[in-house]
Image (cartoon, grey):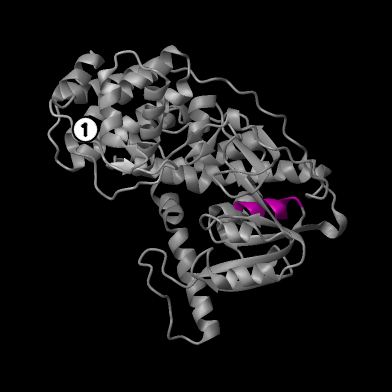
Amino acid sequence: MIDSHISRYVPSTIPPPLKQVDFDTATKLIACARQVQWSEEEIATLEFLSKRIEISKCLYESYLISGGRASSNLLAPELMILALPLLLKDMRRLMEAQRPTSAIKRLNAALKLLDFLKARNIELDKDLVELVHSTTTQFFQQHTHTEASPVAAHDKSSTILPGNTLTVTVLFWEGPIARAYLAMLKDMGLKAEKIIQLVSRKDLASKKPVGRFLPGPLRLAYAQYKQRNSIHHWSNVLQRSEANLCRSIRTEVEKGFGVSTSAIDDALALRELSEYSSNVEQLLVDDLADETLYRHLAALPETQILFTGGGIVPRKLLELKQLKYIHIHPGFLPEVRGADCALWSHLMKGRTSATCFYMAPGIDDGDVIHPTYLPALKFAVDTSGTQLKSLYRATYAFFDPWIRATVLRQAIVLTQGFSKVTAQAQIEEDSVTYHFMHERIQSSAFETLFKQVKE
C-alpha cells in the first residue's frame, strides 16, 4: 500500500537538478521514490530529511551538508506530499529492524509535515491522510518500551560539606528549574557560594525594553518583577485551574523521588535569593549572549557554574577556560538527547531519566558526571477533561524541574559537592537525539504517564 502511494506521487516531469548545492531535496526524494529496495544512500537521505522536518516541520529546496538550509525557498508542495509515504515506509523498515527509537522519529516527522501541509491548505488525498493516522495508531498499539533499570536513590543526609557551602556559582535564570535547584540545596542544608541572577532587560513576550526610562535600581527591580510574573504565569494559572492535576504530580514526586514537602513549598514560594546564598549578584542582560554577562563571567576566578536555563549557552562562554558549566539534562545521555526528553524518556524507556554533565558546544554534549534512570512514576488523576497544552505545561512546571533537582541531589552526594568528580566522555555511537514531540505523540506519552483515574 505504501509503495502504491509513493508511485502515485512521483512527478511525471522530473525537475532539473539544482547546480552547486550540497543537497538537492527534489532530486534526492525522487531517487528514493524510484527505488523499491533502498541502498544505504536512500536510507541516509531519509534520515537526513526526517531530521530537517522534525526541526522545521517542512522541507526546503536545498540544504548544506551540515544540515542548514541552503535556500529559503520551500520545496514544491507535491514533493513534500511525496515525502509523507517515504517517511512511513522508512518507519516500517526501522520497526522491522527492531529500531523503535529511530522509527518514532520518522513518525514524528511525518505528523509534523502533515500538519504543515494542512495549515497551508494543500489538497491531500484522503487515503494518504488516513494512512498516516492508521500507521500512528498501529505503532502505539505495537510499541512496548525498552525497560530501563532505575539507580538506587542516594541518602541526602550523607552529604556533609565544610560550612554547608556548595562551592559552585549558580547562574540563575528565573523559572521552575532554578527554583527547584535552590530549594533542593536548601533542603540538603546547603547554600550556594554565589548566585548570579540574570534579569532580562526585555519583556519575554514582546521583546520590547522594560522600564528603560526608570533609574538603574528601579529598572532592575521592575524588570525582575516582570520576568518573574511572565515565567511563572502558567504555573500560577494551573495551580488554580488544574488543582487536582498539580496535586497528583506533587504527591507522586514526593513519594517516588523522595522530595520533601517543604522543598516543593519553598520552590513555589519564590523566595528572595538571599535565602540561598550570602553572595547574590544581579545582572541586567538581553540574553545569554549579552556582552555584559561575558565580561562578568570572564572576570571570575576558577570555579564551577550551575546552569539553570535561559537559552543556549554561547560557545564563547563555554570556552572560558577557568569555568566549568554543570547542567542537568532530563534524559539519560547520550541515548536520550535533545528536546522534550522528560516525555521521550518515559515513552521510550518506561521511566524518566536525567544526567548531570559538564557542558560543551553542541546539543547536550560534554563529559558525564552522573547519568541515571529514575523510579517510574504514574500520576493518578482524571485528565479526560484536561487540554493537552495544560498537561504539557504542568509537566514542565511541576515534574521536569524535580527530575533534574533529584539528580542534582544525587550528583552532589556522589561527588562530595562536585569536589571529587570523575567525568566520562559520551559514547557517540549510543547517541539518539530527539526533537520536540508532535501533539499526537505527546498524547500517547501522557497516556502512559497519567493513570486516567476517574474521580
**Residue furthest to the front:** 19
The C terminus, quarter of image: top left
Residue at (15, 30) in percent of width and height: 124
Quick one: label 1, few (<14), some, or many (20+) residues within 10 Å? some
Residue 340 rendering spot, x and y as whole percentages: 47, 40
107 and 182: which is toward the camera: 107
Q: Is residue 273 magenta?
A: no
Residue at (49, 48) in percent of width and height: 397
Q: Which residues are magenta?
A: 180-188
Q: Is residue 185 magenta?
A: yes
Residue at (52, 58) in percent of width and height: 310
Assign the magenta stretch its main secondary structure: helix
Residue 439 rendering spot, x and y as whole percentages: 34, 36
Q: Is residue 414 left or right of residue 222?
A: right
| Tag 1: amino acid | Leu
Residue at (78, 58) in percent of width and height: 167
144 in relation to 442, above or below = above
67 and 159: which is toward the camera: 67
Classify residue 400 by image quadrant: top right
Q: Is residue 322 left or right of residue 263?
A: right
Under circle 1, the secondary element is helix
Residue 341 rendering spot, x and y as whole percentages: 51, 37
Residue 254 rendering spot, x and y as whole percentages: 62, 40
The N terminus, quarter of image: top left
Q: Is residue 133 left or right of residue 355?
A: left
- The residue that disc 1 covers is 79
Residue 156 visible in the picture: yes
Q: Is residue 92 left or right of residue 27?
A: right
Residue 384 visible in the picture: no
432 in relation to 339, above or below = above
Classify residue 197 by image quadrant: bottom right
